[in-house]
Amino acid sequence: MPGIAVTTTINGDEVEFICPAEETLLDVLRDRLGLTGAKEGCGTGDCGACSVIVDDRLVCACLMLGAEAQGRRIETIEGMAHGEKLHPLQTKFLEHAALQCGICTPGFLMAAKDLLAKNPNPTEEEIRFGLAGNLCRCTGYDKIVRAVQDAARVMKGA
Amino acid sequence: MHYARPSSMKEASSLMAKARGKAFLLAGGTDLLVRMKGGDIEPDLVVDIKSIKGLSEIKKTARGFSIGAAVSCAAMGEHAGLKKAWPGVVEAANLIGSKQVQSRCTIAGNLCNASPAADSVPALVAAGAKAVIAGPKRKRTVAIEKVTTGPGMTSLAKGEIIEAILLDKRPARTGDAYLRFIPRTEMDIAVVSAGVNLTLDGKGVVKAARVALGAVAPTVLLVPKATRAIVGSKLDDAALERLAAACSAACRPIDDKRGTIEFRQKVAGVLARRAARIAYQRAGGK
Amino acid sequence: MVQVALWGALSAAAGGKKALDIEAKDIRELFRKLEERYPGLKPHIERGIAVSIDGVIYRDTWSKELPDKAEIYLLPRIAGG
Amino acid sequence: MAFDASFTGQKFKSVGTRPIRPDGIDKVTGRARFGADFNMPGQLVGRILRSPHAHARIKKIDTSKAEKLKGVKAVVTAADLPDLTNGDAAMFDILDNCMARKRAFYDGHAVAAVAAIDARTAKQALKLIKVDYGVLPHVTDVDEAVKPKAPVLHKSVFTEGVDPKPKKPSNVARRSQYGHGDVDAGFTAADAIIERTFRTEQTHQGYIEPHACVASVNSDGTGELWVCTQGHFAYRQTCAQLLGMDVSKLRVTSSEIGGGFGGKTHVWAEPVALALSRKAGRPVKLVMTRNEVFRASGPASATSIDVKIGAKKDGTVTAAEATLRYSCGPYAGMWAELGAMTSFACYDLKNVKSVGYEVLVNRPKTAAYRAPSAPMAAFAVESVMDELAHKIGMDPVKFRIKNAAREGSKSSYGPVYGPIGIGPTLEAAQKHPHMKAPLGKNQGRGMACGFWFNFGGQTCTDLNIGIDGTVTLAVGTVDVGGSRASLTLVAAEELGIPYEQVKVVVADTATLGHNDMTDGSRGTFSSSMATIFAARNAIKVMRERAARMWDIPVEDVTWEDGHAKAKGQKRGNLAPLSIKEIAAAAPNTGGPIAGHNEIVADGAGVSFATHICDVEVDPETGATKVLRYTVVQDAGKAVHPTYVEGQYQGGAAQGIGWALNEEYIYGKDGRLQNAGFLDYRIPVCSDLPMIDTMILEIPNPNHPYGVRGVGETSIVPPLAAIANAVSSAVGVRMTHIPMSPPRILAALDAAKA
């Protein structure tokens, strides 16, 4: 079966790839484009470890076909920092030790970025429900919520 | 597997009608891709309807709202007019899955997946919503409760596609609400759920009511006895108890990994009672 | 001379004995003498057992010296998470 | 509590501070490479075919069609993993679990595997393998499995530890017993006795990263394995033995690991990946799906536990007894025994007895899960302690303090305790403001204690001084939760240099001596000990080099604040030499400078915690919301307090999930019904409150800095703490975990009836 040719924008760069129709965006990112920052924790949209932002909406890359990426604008964890300068969320995750094993971290950072873009001043409850699609098994979420709260503070001031 | 991205309903309908092998529609894909991953289905054709003109829009019409089949539930939550008119429907739609799933999932998909536990369906049934179904030859409009016929089964013929979901314009003194029970606070499938839609008269007496229950029977249940239990009342405690009892009695649930028969029966009544109270307040009742 | 308490399955393997007096200067010698006296203990020792000397648990150090009159407990080698 | 003065007086410069972890930047930018993030040239995709039956004879496997499929490069079955275990029964069980031989023992048991050029081909190939099963009767429930008429998994299993040896085989693999005194006499002396039976369901560690590896075996008998594991040396040992390879010829590299909690201390698919690579002659990447992780890795035991405790009116416990039945999956373990050992470890008891039964069932092999077996035993015991306190009219905290073990107490599992933290954690909890906070309607407060042993074990480190005076520390314990940060602090502390001057890496199996796994809360405890000694060895070398540079006797050179200093009046004019200066001169003073250390890091101090929690229960739906949670735990010495807090919070969160919603659900057909994160419900962010922590520091006299392991104990008290809180909120004693809404509602209805 011939593959599907797709042209898309990833982290600001135009990218072309060919993939079989049934291949997910996650498999395209990881196996074809070498962007392994998005992780597969479940493959069924239940853990959020593969979260990416597509046309300003947060999605699970495992629940989207690669073919659907045609003409879209995709942001992944690899594009979060600007050169050497980390995004405030990245800095705050480090400062607050909001990660232990780190496998869920890229997904949480993308979800938190989306959350703050839509709600720059979230309450603790809004953060908790906003991040409920991302599973973390190490931290108990406490330090993640604090890191997002602190990042929101910093980003408002900036 | 083939992937097609038609630009018109006609083209989509024709692709589906002519498909040999297993063909599936793709809107949000949040059920379809999960089933593909699990190996439950191996489609020969997937038809992506998101490029069809108008399908991703919420239109305000003279008769109410028309929600395109490819409108994401997140977009519904961002539509101020829809949210104001049908808060119960929107909150039900916004309970499906995570933020990530919300960005993609649709109420038409939620309906066609035909799970008895679908969150948006009891709210839509209570709301008296209709589905516009486009086929290769004609279009038809049917009540939501006529779409699903059993778990995973719909009344749609080969080549038929839901184009939009219609919600009526809201007169004064109306309100709807949806509540579901899940063990966690997010990310679960409803163990039992209830949607209630009320119209009051000037004195706060319930004039009309529709009550629908989810996850307690093979399809979402519209409960006429629940309507009778509260119409004519000001939703006093006795009416609410009658409502709860009618809902519990209407359930035909099963024991499964998500809950027991007893639990579903009991909590169906509790949720209907609580949802009715919210709908009543939204309708201006006190 | 040290006092050795046997626990759990070890006691059964030593003919039901719960405590023994043994002349041993370190864990290695203790194991050797136990094996000689109670061949039933050999598979347990080979599988790995931990030694508690006056309340401190040693899993691997055969050369650990046993102070005179020390309280010795033989325990199963435990797994962790 | 007696403290060793030499520890409490210690002043630290680096240890106890909270710098940013060294591996952090890679983890927030997506650059960190986990198990599935690595590829090799010519790599194939491996997939495993699994039994759909809970128990079945494997009559025949026909792989011929799969082998003929274009793109398939190897198909393996048990025949490709021959038994080389040489009578080692434990090793044979591992082999049989990796690839079923004569029988499939659970839904998900591996029966064959393929390696193909891509995922699509591999998936197709699995469908072409025909397995002829003879379905056998199965048993998945721990209480059903011990009944006389239950299907027996192994005809060769006669309960060990019972005298005389049983005449009939059974599913009870072993009996173990702990305790001292005379419990019958103790119960006779009691004024009040509580006796109850408890059940807990099977839970999974729930690490977010599925098992993943890339295996490459060459025709010359050498091989490489890239894998997410808690112990790459142990994986090497096991894989080499099962594959018949020389240990030294298999090089295992541990990837970044996306959580383990005990589940990555056992091999699962790695030997299969190696067998596929050997047969295909190409590297093979094998990544489990989430479904496979649930069905075919190693969850914790399901349990059934009887507890009886008696006390006098003044609060003295006179006797305590427990019978514990733990499921092991199809292979004998020592899970009930660990439950028996830990059950009463918090208390100073005159008369105590605990008996454990290892029960074989048709479920996946039980594996370690954070303080394995202790949470379930603590749930049962702490629930009864709570109820007994109420029965004699005593405050539950006071009741526990009165009976708490202390230095010199004879533990329920045998040894006498040294300085321990159970008393202080209880006293801190008693004084905590949380204890006095008001409660509302339908709300309840519970507290409970927990114990875990902690391990030390085989450890070594290499500390190398670079030419510019910066330091590389190679350790062999896998970093699961930030231990590289702690070990950097320890190296900086001992050498007297800034944190930024030290870089810690986890070495592979070819570049460092054997290290035991990161398990038993030993990672930071044991590697910090080896790091301290390695640094001291390096300092010794640096003093010698400084002596040479100054041309004075080495005895006259001391080490202070990261510098060599010359002693004595006449040398007062010699400026201290920094590591940088000593390193720069190294080529001329004797060559490279390094410090090594190889130890058995024994003497890990036991660990205790006390947790407090508040819940609100909806009496109409049985839904429980955790309102407030506080962890008090002894850390010995917290090397990096933020990551210690993280361990406390993470363990508590896992315990909360276990207590309320997590469970393996089996159908009548013996198949697992909820093998995914949708219906195996681990807590999400909105389920939890902030988790307050309080770190106590009761130094461990067996560690140079007083460090104790902190990783596991935090999962022990939550089951009981929440059960006590829920029981208090609803007025009914909850005895079945998880306390899911249907169970709570059913218990309320039963109480009303």
Image (cartoon, grey):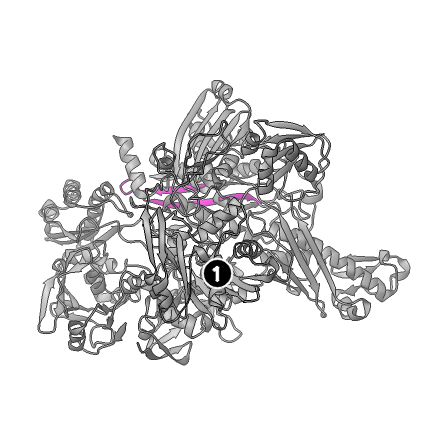
- Is D631 covered by the magenta stretch? yes
Residue D136 position within the rendered picture, expressed as x and y whole percent measured from the top left: 33, 44
Residue D361 position within the rendered picture, expressed as x and y whole percent measured from the top left: 39, 41
Q: Is residue A120 left or right of residue D639?
A: left
Q: Quadrant of residue D172?
A: top left
Task: Name the secondary structure under disc 1.
Answer: helix
> In this rendering, does residue A81 appear at all?
yes
Which of the pair D133/D217 is nearer the observer?
A: D133
The part of the chain drawn in magenta is: D611-634
Host chain of mark 1: D
- Is B266 covered by the magenta stretch? no
Point out the image quarter for the N terminus of chain D: top right
Which of the pair D325/B11 is nearer the observer?
A: D325
The kind of residue on which mark 1 rests is Ala
Q: Is residue D285 above or below residue D205?
A: below
Residue D325 position within the rendered picture, expressed as x and y whole percent measured from the top left: 43, 35
Which of the pair D234/B162 is nearer the observer?
A: D234
Which of the pair B240/D740 is nearer the observer?
A: D740
The residue beneath circle 1 is: D275
Number of residues whose C-alpha sits closer than 10 Å to that of mark 1, classed few (under 14), some (14–19) or many (20 or more) = many
Q: Is residue A70 above or below residue D546?
A: below
Q: Is residue D611 left or right of residue C50?
A: left
Q: Which residue sits at x=43%, y=62%?
A: D287
Q: Main secondary structure of the magenta part?
A: strand
Point out the image quarter for the C terminus of chain D: top left
Q: Quadrant of residue A43?
A: bottom left
Q: Is residue D592 left or right of residue C58?
A: right
Q: Is residue B49 left or right of residue D593?
A: left
